[in-house]
């Protein structure tokens, strides 16, 4: 069974049902018509808002498909040019008109009659966007959007030669699970050398992006890009100071957990020194976990896992497969990473990833499927802005699904010992994730607090952040240059700055959801799905409460969650013979 695809597509009331566009001139008259309308009642105002929403949805989905096609084939110049054309020709003009429509919304007396709590969230974010808007920033934002895509092109072109084969870096990284330590080291060094070849390119790219971002913030009358970005991201339920306090809590509470996990790895492998190429191999001396063979196998097994949780979730993935909206396998020329891209008018999202057959790939599928479920479940919400959830909520959906689904990974691992190994590995990563999140987030805070820094200072700052949260348990002696450049792998720093702390906040929430699932699976899934259905019609703390957890990153709460997680990790360890 699949979701009824024909019923998913958003029904239009303002634009013609068959309307598509290729140029700005085709959509501009509809925006002018919208600008000229003067709603004279609450009902008319709501209809006007929905008409504006239709145009937002149309443009957002067109841009989404251009981005999807570009990441699927970074070497295709015509696809890249189509994306660039939208960024440079359509988006700037629409931004100007959109600002006028926002002011029209603000000035209407009827907006105060929108009593649904969802409009309170919508209203506060729209007003904040108006406060930040500066027309002189539009060319800068256009340049930033264009430059950010260079990261994918540079990274997607990276590959190594190994035993006569050309391997993408995701394919090469999969070989770091091999038990032959000499082989692991050789591959790790080849990958690192390949990254170093483009390190100056990536340094220079971040220079350009940082300069533009700092200028954008100054022109919006903000004291720093950090302040500007927090406001732009709509972070109204927590502050910069809260993030810095979270860093301190991670250093004191989570870092010892990470060190415990790494000491366990070092002891199990019988090593005097734990080196960077020792971090993926199975510590119990077993062959690398291989949960699936190809993309088709991954899809079929994932559907079976989700069917055990709720049949409707399996139906959603089946629908994506039927619609050919799953691109899962790694290949040359494909952008790095993985994502779920909502398609607001189509109603069914697109999942992109770089699978090479590893346990991490299977985790990624569970994660992105959680995002996909979110897209499906919010599709019927009235406005597109209600569906565009902040990352703190979006990542709760994905990270919770990783942990919930783990109870059913026997579909991927019929062998009980392999199943337990997979779960131990995954839970260990969940518990230590906050250390990596704090490393990346604190580094970004440093970047924009020190706008006039050199490449050397940047690398030194990264190493300080790395050591603060990850310590010296991994021996990098002789590899200092590689460690100083690890941040260049992180897509978020280039494409979506400051989007990273959300993973840490959501991981705490997800562990809470999983704790509830262990106690009462049916109730926990009900709460999880009900939270997802809210989209962004309630505040972040309210959505978390609906999911049955706290939006809380106090030291006391972090300690409680870490204690629970370590307890479950010890229980899993005890199952290994």
Image (cartoon, rainbow, N blue to C red):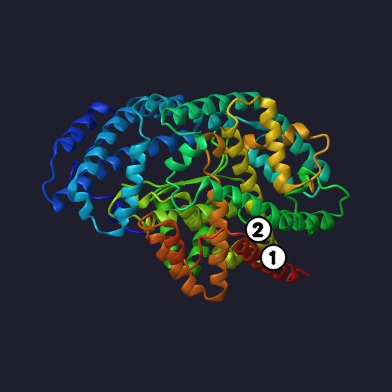
At x 20% / y 55%, what residue is drawn?
113
499 left or right of 536 in image: right
Q: Secondary structure at mark 1?
A: helix
Relative depth, front residue between 349 and 199: 199
In the drawing, what numbered circle is on residue 566?
1
The correct choice, above or below, for 157 with respect to 245 in the image is: above
Binning the other alpha carbons within 10 Å of mark 1 as few (below 14), some (14 to 19) or many (20 upward) gives some
- Residue 357 seen anywhere in this rendered image of the structure: no
At x 83% / y 34%, what residue is drawn?
478
The percent position of residue 62, horizontal first and vertical second, equals: 34, 37
Furthest residue toward bottom: 520
Relative depth, front residue between 90 and 133: 133
At x 63% / y 49%, what residue is drawn?
247
- Which image quarter is the N terminus in? bottom left
The percent position of residue 382, horizontal first and vertical second, equals: 27, 54
Q: Which residue is mark 2?
A: 431
The correct choice, above or below, for 117 with respect to 461 in the image is: below
Disc 2 to disc 1, C-alpha distance: 8 Å
């Amino acid at each position: 069974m699949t979701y009824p695809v024909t019923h998913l597509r958003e029904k239009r009331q303002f634009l013609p049902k068959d309307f598509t566009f290729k140029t700005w001139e085709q959509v501009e008259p509809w925006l002018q018509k919208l600008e000229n309308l003067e709603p004279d009642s609450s009902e008319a105002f709501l209809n006007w808002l929905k008409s504006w929403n239709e145009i937002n949805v149309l443009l957002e989905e067109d841009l989404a498909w251009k981005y999807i096609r570009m990441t699927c084939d970074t070497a295709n110049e015509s696809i890249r040019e189509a994306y660039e054309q939208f960024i440079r020709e359509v988006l700037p003009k629409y931004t100007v008109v959109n600002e006028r429509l926002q002011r029209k919304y603000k000035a209407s007396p009827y907006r105060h009659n929108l009593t649904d709590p969802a409009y309170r969230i919508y209203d506060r974010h729209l007003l904040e966007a108006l406060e930040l808007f500066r027309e002189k920033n539009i060319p800068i934002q256009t340049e930033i959007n264009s430059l950010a895509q260079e990261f994918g092109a540079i990274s997607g072109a990276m590959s190594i030669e190994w035993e006569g084969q050309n391997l993408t870096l995701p394919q090469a990284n999969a070989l770091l699970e091999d038990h032959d330590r000499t082989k692991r080291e050789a591959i790790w060094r080849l990958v690192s050398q390949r990254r170093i070849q483009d390190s100056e390119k990536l340094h220079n790219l971040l220079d350009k992006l940082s300069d533009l971002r700092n200028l954008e913030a100054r022109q919006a009358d903000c004291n720093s890009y950090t302040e500007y970005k927090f406001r732009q991201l709509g972070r109204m339920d927590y502050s910069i100071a809260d993030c810095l306090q979270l860093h301190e809590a991670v250093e004191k509470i989570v870092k010892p957990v990470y060190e415990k996990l790494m000491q366990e790895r070092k002891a199990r492998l019988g090593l005097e020194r734990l080196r960077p190429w020792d971090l993926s191999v199975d510590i119990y001396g077993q062959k690398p976990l291989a949960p699936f063979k190809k993309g088709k196998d991954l899809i079929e097994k994932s559907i079976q896992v989700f069917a055990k949780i709720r049949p409707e979730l399996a139906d959603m993935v089946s629908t994506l497969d039927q619609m050919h909206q799953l691109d899962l396998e790694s290949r040359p020329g494909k952008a790095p990473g993985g994502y779920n891209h909502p398609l607001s008018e189509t109603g069914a999202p697109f999942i992109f990833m770089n699978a090479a057959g590893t346990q991490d790939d299977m985790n990624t599928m569970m994660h992105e499927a959680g995002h996909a479920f979110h897209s499906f479940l919010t599709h019927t919400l009235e406005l597109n802005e209600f569906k565009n959830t902040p990352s703190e909520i979006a990542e709760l959906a994905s990270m919770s699904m990783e942990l919930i689904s783990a109870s059913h990974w026997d579909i991927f691992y019929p062998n009980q010992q392999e199943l337990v190994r997979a779960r131990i590995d995954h839970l260990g990563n969940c518990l230590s994730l906050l250390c990596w999140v704090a490393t990346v987030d604190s580094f970004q805070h440093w970047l924009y607090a020190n706008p006039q820094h050199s490449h050397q200072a940047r690398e030194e700052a990264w190493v300080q952040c790395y050591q603060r949260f990850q310590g010296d348990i991994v021996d990098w002696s002789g590899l200092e240059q590689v460690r100083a450049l690890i941040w260049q792998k992180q897509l978020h720093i280039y494409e979506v700055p400051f989007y990273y702390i959300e993973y840490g906040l959501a991981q705490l929430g997800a562990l809470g959801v999983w704790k509830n699932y262990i106690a009462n699976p049916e109730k926990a899934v009900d709460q999880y799905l009900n939270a997802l259905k809210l989209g962004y019609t309630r505040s972040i703390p309210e959505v978390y409460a609906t999911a049955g957890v706290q939006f809380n990153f106090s030291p006391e709460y972090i300690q409680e969650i870490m204690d629970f997680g370590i307890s479950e990790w010890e229980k899993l360890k005890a199952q290994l013979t």
